[in-house]
Amino acid sequence: MKTRDVSESSFLAEFPDVSAEEANRSAVALADRLARKPVSGLLDAIPGATTLFLLFDPHVVDREKLVRRLRRLSEEARTTPRETRRFRIPVAYGGEFGPDLTLLAGERGISAGELARRHALADYTVAFLGFSPGFAYLSGLPPELFAARRETPRTRVPAGSVAIGGSWTAIYPAETPGGWTLIGRSAVRLFDPAAHPPALLRPGDRVFFQPMTEGDLRARIAESRNEPAHAPLAEEDVLFETITPGLFTSVQGAPRFGPGASGVPAGGAMDLFALERGNAAVGNASGAAGLEITLAGPELVVRMDTLLCVTGADLDARCNGSAVPLDQPFPAKAGDRVSFGYASAGMRAYLCVQGGLALPLPGEPVARLSKGDLVARASPPARPTTGPPARAGPSPAPGGSLVALGRELALRVLPGPQPSFFPIRALEVFFSGTYRISSDSDRRGIRLDGPRLELDRPPDIPPEGTALGSIQVPANGLPIVLGPDRPVTGGYAKIATVVASDWPLLAQALPGTSVRFRAAGAFLA
């Protein structure tokens, strides 16, 4: 077993002297052993195609100590393999549900129907889960159907899309961005956050596809839309009622580690420093959930007496029309109105409430507030605390992570895990060029416009775990900095990783902000 650093608090375990299939089995087996024998300070262990991604708290466990523990576990005798289950999944191929099928078939010199037939006849095995909740990477794709990832990933891939990415095939469990070739659609539910375990498929399962008509698929999609929604909130649990929702307002707390092997991202607030300041001001534990308010804020009616605090970006917060100072707690009574305007400094504000807010289940899609939505308090309330927020690394002063419009950011970066993909000239461009934050950015990734980076080879890699701040480079050469809701595993080469303490600067930078990179480690081409 060898290791490769990704960030200050994560690394990849590799198995270089065996086949890809054996490396995958070793990664899955080692993750299983870690689940049975937990290591203090280990936050997540995520198998990939040929690697195991380890995320740890460096204040609790030393990296080298963790590596030694992994080596001992990797040398243990194999346990009994998991039970193999079989799943037959109906798919409607082509047409509006598989927009890339005809093009791919033409490139392969066969008809669309023949490509669909070959795809459906294959016998697939779940190698690992990653990318998004319940997303299972299936091995066994016929070699003639291999398809490179798109040069520019789509910003929206519909839920249920059946796709090919390199030598893998998979079904997108939920609507997400994605760079794979779309050949069909299924209505099977692959992830249920309320189930145990939440993912339908697990490593070692066998999967078979069964062609179905577009009409049958539409009927099944209609049935799934009629499934009962969440139970209504109890009146005594409602803290806020949404009058206007703002641009993108959602409930966010601290990252929740552990279910990464099911494809569930840790998530959490974009600017944890700001959230922790607000929680400290109202007496909450540092990770209690509040409202993350992006660029343009909501108007809310308070439904019960409470204590509030606004931190982060200046969005002209007001209570009953009177200005609310940042980082200062203030009382609010039932019937009061709290409103936000547009960002004048920074990108995201946080509204923290004494006791915290109720979080969705891990793996549920991040839901932006809509008009009329009710926001519930946490049950039980967040644990009160009296000390400063507990956080790895120094916390900036109030407002310290805000980025004024027109200011250029200089971000420190560590070497990425794929140095051989980027020639010296690409590194020169990366460190000398100026990038701008694209308006297409979101919590999954901050897209950058600017000089394109040349690669020595196609950027596709065997999918592996990703870290907050990893900078991946797809075939179009434009970097994407991965955020809290990033793909749990990714298949693009990564040139660098933003230093953890610089991440809040990027999280608070408005679209159009200029970004330059500075090396915080030795980069070798």
Image (cartoon, rainbow, N blue to C red):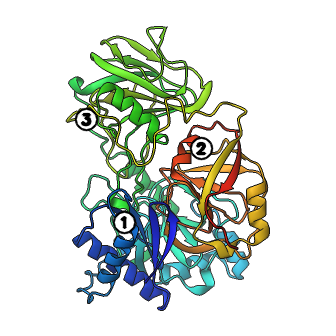
Mark 3 element type: loop
Viewer-proximal residue, 48 or 516?
A: 516
- Type of amino acid under label 3: Ala
Q: Is residue 451 left or right of residue 358?
A: right
For the N terminus, give its image quadrant: bottom left
How far separated are the C-alphas under marks 1 and 3? 30 Å
Give the amino acid at mark 1.
Answer: Asp
Q: Quadrant of the C terminus?
A: bottom right
Residue at 48 percent across and 90 percent down: it is 19
C-alpha span from label 3 to label 2: 28 Å
Q: Is residue 250 visible?
A: no
Q: Position of residue 390 (x, y in %)?
A: 34, 42
Q: Which residue is mark 2?
A: 506
Q: Is residue 283 visible?
A: yes
Disc 1: CA contacts within 10 A as few (<14), some (14-19) or many (>=20):
few
Q: Secondary structure at mark 2?
A: helix
Q: Is residue 37 left or right of residue 51?
A: left
What is the spatial separation of the Cα atoms under label 2 and label 1, in whole angstroms? 28 Å
Query: Mark 3 — residue?
Result: 382
Tag 1 or tag 2, which sits nearer the N-term? 1
Q: Earlier in the sequence, mark 1 or mark 3?
A: 1
Q: Residues within 10 Å of mark 3 (few under 14, many from 20)?
A: many
Does residue 346 lie above or below 6 as drawn?
above
Which numbered circle lies on residue 62? 1
Residues at circles 3 and 2 in contact by the CB criterion of under 8 Å: no
Q: Secondary structure at mark 1?
A: loop
- Report which quarter residue 226 is drawn in: top left
In this view, the residue in front, 276 or 298, is: 276
Q: Amino acid at mark 2?
A: Leu
